[in-house]
Amino acid sequence: MAKIQFVVKRNGAIVKFNPDRISNAIYRAAVAVGGRDKETAERLRDKVVEEIERKFNKNDKPHIEEIQDIVEKVLIENGHAKVAKEYILYRDEQKKRRAQNATQGTRPSENIPWPKIWQILDWSVSNNLHTIDLLNERIRNNGFSEVVNISEKLYEHDVDQAAKLIAEKASSLKMVMITGPSSSGKTTTTFKMEEKLKSKGMSFKPLVVDNYFFDLEIHPKDEFGDYDFETPQALDLDLINKHLHLLSQGEEVKIPYYDFKAGKRYLDRTPLQLKEGEVLLIDSLHALFPRFSEGIDSSMTFKVYLEPLVQLKGPDNKYVQWTDLRLIRRMLRDSVHRAYNPQQTLEHWHYVRSSELRHIIPYGNNADYIISSGMPYEIALYKPLMYEKFKEWEALYRDNPLREDAYKRAARVAKILEAVDGIVDNSPVPKSSVLREFIGGSIYEH
């Protein structure tokens, strides 16, 4: 048992010292540079603990920054320079992100697709749907069906435009990639895109990227036993890239098979080859991550990026955050299709958000086309389904320093849902809507 019992977090909260958090952080940094040796991570953790206990007295409460300084020192002194560099880089990125959050609104972010945002905002203002109060007014005047109709048309227009651009590139195209952060609507959009492009004479073969996951036992996890599937390093990126190169050259590859129940991957299972005129269709979180398609000529690819870019002001004159929409979507989808408790989704979301801010969102502007999958009416559907739960979670996590992230999200979403008029009857929502991927009743198989 470690001599040090408590540590001080950045917000001043005092929490129990958990050495496993050190080995997890070291292992995650190692995974990012290609290492997957948990035993080495645990040995290095023990050295870090030894150094902490040498430096501090029993009743001391080290600050988290002091512990991280020691982790860096131990990694470098024990010959793990690459892991140390990744650890330092991640630490620096987190520091910059905290600084940006503290000065939010003072300067524009390079990661936000501003031209698309202005387009959505202009549409929202033109249709009197840029605030929750205006949405409530439409609902109270029996205008919900009309709001659904015009919102769906905007999304369909985006899909049509992307399909048109893809078709224009058909002669050189080898792969279409549908990408975006969690619960942005990739699956439904992929189905729709395939339908529209088939009508234009194009032929597709799907590549299921989930089959490239590494075995569960070598995934990083936290002190709560929560595995991190959100990082691109959870996938065998080298094998994906190799297969994409071979497929683009007309070669046959054998796709692995991933057994999610057993958490194991089996190599060389399913043969795949592109015939003349066929195009690979890929739905993946990390299709824009550089190593995914590194070295493949851009003339062979078309990349579509999704995000629910709703421009809707709520309480305190603040815009509804896209990540909150996606959080609710994922809760609904996971509870129905994956037997995953919504509370677990909330507790896991810090992994989702951390990974997408580092590995997905920074590359969004590199896409060939951006689609907004957001519907200004969707929060009205979520109120009767989720409002009471978010209020419960807000109370549950209020005084828990280890669940600070979950508390902040629960409180913010509860405030948004409280402000909107709820809709119980979702029948006006088309069966082909991207929202059906999350609320159920879709014509597509998810």
Image (cartoon, rainbow, N blue to C red):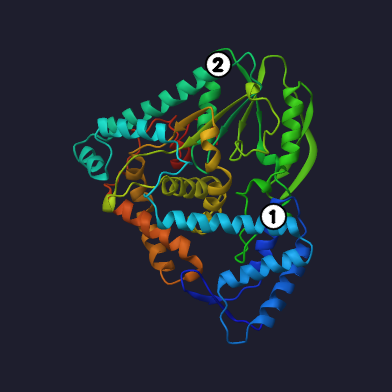
As rendered, which of 249 and 298 lies closer to the eye? 298
The label number, if any, that marks residue 446 in the structure image: none
Is any part of residue 197 visible from this angle? yes
As rendered, which of 343 and 237 lies closer to the eye? 237
Instruction: Report whether 379 appears left or right of 224.
Output: left
Q: Residue at x 55, y 74 (%)?
A: 63
As rendered, which of 140 and 2 lies closer to the eye? 2
Residue beneath disc 1: 219
Figure quadrant of the N terminus: bottom right
Q: Quadrant of residue 379?
A: top left
Q: Residue at x 72, y 17 (%)?
A: 275
As rendered, which of 87 and 230 lies closer to the eye? 87
> Label 1's element?
loop
Please state the horizontal and vertical placement of residue 366, each as a whole percent of the image.
55, 33
> Label 2's element?
helix
Residue beneath disc 2: 167
Instruction: Report whether 200 appears left or right of 24.
Output: left
Please state the horizontal and vertical placement of residue 386, each as a whole percent of the image.
38, 52
Instruction: Give, as a three-letter code, the residue at label 1.
Output: His
Q: Residues within 10 Å of mark 2 (few under 14, many from 20)?
A: some
Q: Residue at x 78, y 29 (%)?
A: 253
Is any part of residue 217 visible from this angle? no
Instruction: Report whether 65 appears left or right of 80.
Output: left
Q: CA distance from mark 1 to mark 2?
A: 39 Å
Is residue 3 positioned above or below 321 on the image? Answer: below
Is residue 202 positioned above or below 70 on the image? Answer: above
Q: Residue at x 55, y 16 (%)?
A: 167
Query: Do the residues under discs 1 and 2 have CB atoms within 8 angstroms?
Result: no
Please state the horizontal and vertical placement of residue 89, each as a whole percent of the image.
62, 55
Instruction: Give, as a three-letter code, the residue at label 2.
Output: Ala
